Every structure is written in C-alpha cells, then in structure tokens.
Amino acid sequence: MLYHLFEYLNKLDFPGAGLFQYISFRAGMAAFLSLLITIIFGKRLIETLRKHQMGESIRYLGLEGQMEKQGTPTMGGIIIISAIIIPTLLFADLNNIYTLLLILTTLWMGTIGFLDDYLKVRKKNKEGLRGKFKILGQVVLGLVVALVMVYHKDIVVRDFSGEAFNDKSTLLTTIPFVANNEFNYEWLLPDFLDDYTWVIYVFVVIFIVTAVSNGANIADGVDGLAAGVCAIIGLTLAVLAYLSGNAIFSDYLNIMFIPNSGELVIFCTAFVGACIGFLWYNAYPAQIFMGDTGSLSLGGIIAVLAFVIRKEFLIPILCGILVMENISVILQVSFFKYTRKKYGEGRRIFLMSPLHHHYQKKGIHEAKIVGRFWIVGILLAIFTLATLKIR
C-alpha cells in the first residue's frame, strides 16, 4: 500500500518518495517492522491466549523437562502470520503475481493450521483436524500454485537478452551441480505428450508443498527449532530471489533471470523478521509455541518460494533439517511395522522419532540440540548458495 502511494508521489517529484523504488530499502523496512510486530504484540498475544486458556496439552513421552511445558500458550503462529502479511502489504508491490501467490499461501496454510490448533486446544480434540483434511488443503494449495505458475501471463523465465527461452518457459527450473543447469519438465515425457507436462509439474508441486510443510510441522517439537531453521532458510531464499530477479547478477552468475521475482525479497525479509522476532518468546524456555498455525504456514511458504524462483531441486540441501526430520519419522514407522510383521515384535532405528527427540533421549539438552541444528542449517544454507558456482 505504501509502495503504491510513494510510487504515485514519486511521479509528482515528491522529495524522498524515490526511496520506495529500491528493493533493499523496502526489504529492510519490512524486516524491521516484522521484528517490531512480533516483539511488541507477541507479549499481548501470550497474555490473551493465557486468559482464554489456549495452552498446550502435553502427551508424556518420557523426555526430560517435557511436562514443565504443560499449559504453555500455543497458536503463536497468529503473530508470525501477522508479522509477515502486514509489512508485505505495506512495502511490497501488490500487483506482483509472485507476492500475491505467497500471501495466498500464508493465509491458506495458516487457516488449516489454525483449525487444527483450535480443535486441539479449544475443543479438546486430541487429534485436531483430521489428517485427510490437512492433506486435502495442502493438495489444493499445490494445485493452485502449479496452475498459476504454468498459465499466468506474467510468469516467464527470460534469457539475458530479455527474450523468453520458449513459449513454455514456466516449465523450466534449475538443477544443481550441472553446468547448463536449466531443466525442462517437458523432457520427462515424449514429444507427443508435451501438452500434458503440466500434470507432472502439478504432482511435483503438491508433493513438495506437502513434504516441506509437514517437515516444518514435525520440526516444531523443541523450543526455537522450527523458527530458527526457517529463518535461516528464508534468508537464503531472499538472496536467491534477489539474484534471480536482477538481470546483472543473473548474467554474471549464469543463472535464470526471472523478471519481477526480486520483489519477493520484501516478503522474504518479513518472513525472516517474523521468525527471528518470534524467537524472542519461543527460544528456550518457550513462553509460547507457534502450533500448526505457524509451522504449516512456514513450511508452505518455503516450498512455494522455492518453486517461484525455480530452486525446488535445492530443497533437499537447503531444507536438509526439515527433510531429515521427515525421513526419521518415515523410517522409524516403516521399520517398526516391517519388523513387527516379520519378527512379531516392532524394532526401532532411533531411540525416538523425529530426530530431535532421538538426541533428547540420549541425554542432550534441547537448547544444545537446537543450537547444533541451527549450525547445521547455516552450513546447508552456505552450501546451497555455493551451488550457484559449483557446477
């Protein structure tokens, strides 16, 4: 909103209005406001949730210090979503299709998470929103994102001369560690089936949106883990969005030039600011939990951001923490069922899944686990950026 106001004032030569033309200035302002919103209003949200007895119900798993968290307010994702949306509305170009797509993602996934938290906390339904409805919501979002990416007229990938690669450049993406790293989804099908490539793309988007959002949800099991890891990922995506949306840098790095994707830096910095600001209250010992309202939103945002800037194949590296959290649960459950069927007794790979609980069972304090996971996340982020040159 402010962006469009100052864009108009700039045409009238109003002094200082030109500042809003710079992505760097608006990104900084978005991050600053996002931090302020979470820190200032976070305390009020905690008090409100306590007043309405919106506390976490803890299921005892035999973990040290676990029961001390009983009654800690949850649904803190409300403040995260607010701290992302408000700065984005103020400082971003609301005519940008990428920005609108990310706003939709935030609100859609936040609504699914809110319903789950509300049923668990307010209605005392331990299961919350049934799994099939969560999956349905993620599938619908993935379908919408994929169709917009394929068919919207403003979404195109261009070469450095400004020309589109081809009439289906929306189906192009990037694969790491390859010299000429453009990959076209059309190559997965024979030529006579080119018109149906979008179907494969839809399935890929749905799978990754579901996997990453669930990964963030699973990682939200110890104080500060999900928020810290997502902040690191968000900052990396901000750098990638800026480079991809800048013709000079994309030319220098020999990566895809994606017009208008640089505008996503404003959204990304608001995202990072919200995550870091939330840590003010969520770091050990947590005064509030983000709940599914926050974790599903953060995961969905990360997945859609990766698709928008054509970096979805970097997710296994950049989101390595979230991926491993997901895989640890899948391996544990699958191995337990297999051994129970074969030997009559279920066996485990980890002391407990997801992975962070395994280390808790080994006697490592959760604050140290979170700190080490953050360090690994930073290493993965650096390596992700290095893939721009390692090919």
Image: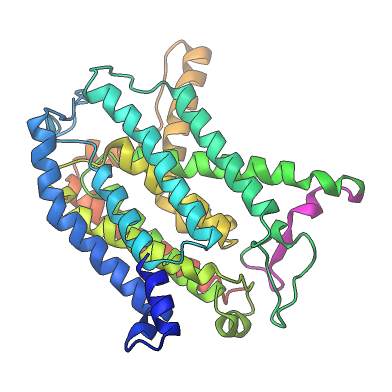
Give me the residue at 32% from left, 43% from top.
Answer: 294
Location of residue 38 (image quadrant) = bottom left
Residue 30 in the image, given as x and y percentages of width and height:
31, 67
- Between 317 and 278, the one nearer to me in the picture: 278
In the rendered structure, the answer to whether residue 92 lies left or right of residue 76 reads right
Which residue: 32% across, 33% down? 114
Place of residue 95 in the rendered image (x, y in percent of width and height, measured from the top left): 51, 62
Residue 107 placement: quadrant: top left
On screen, residue 12 above or below 231: below
Could you tell me how many numbered marks the image carries?
0
Examine the rendering and report whether any part of residue 215 can be seen.
no
Q: Is residue 116 visible?
A: yes
Q: Residue at x 59, y 42 (%)?
A: 144
* Residue situated in front as seen by the camera: 171 or 232: 171
* Image location of residue 347, percent across then percent down: 41, 22
Q: Nearer the viewer, residue 345 or 22?
A: 22
Q: Does the magenta segment cover residue 103?
A: no
Residue extending farthest top:
344
Residue 42 relative to residue 198: left or right: left
The answer to whether residue 385 is left or right of residue 81 is right
Q: Which residues are magenta?
A: 177-191
Front-most of residues 333 and 322: 322
Quadrant where the N terminus is found in the figure: bottom left
Above or below: residue 247 compared with residue 342: below
Which residue is rendered at x = 16% and y = 29% of the image? 54
- The quadrant of the image that shows the C terminus is bottom right
Q: Position of residue 312 (x, y in %)?
A: 57, 55
> How does the figure colour the protein chain or chains?
rainbow
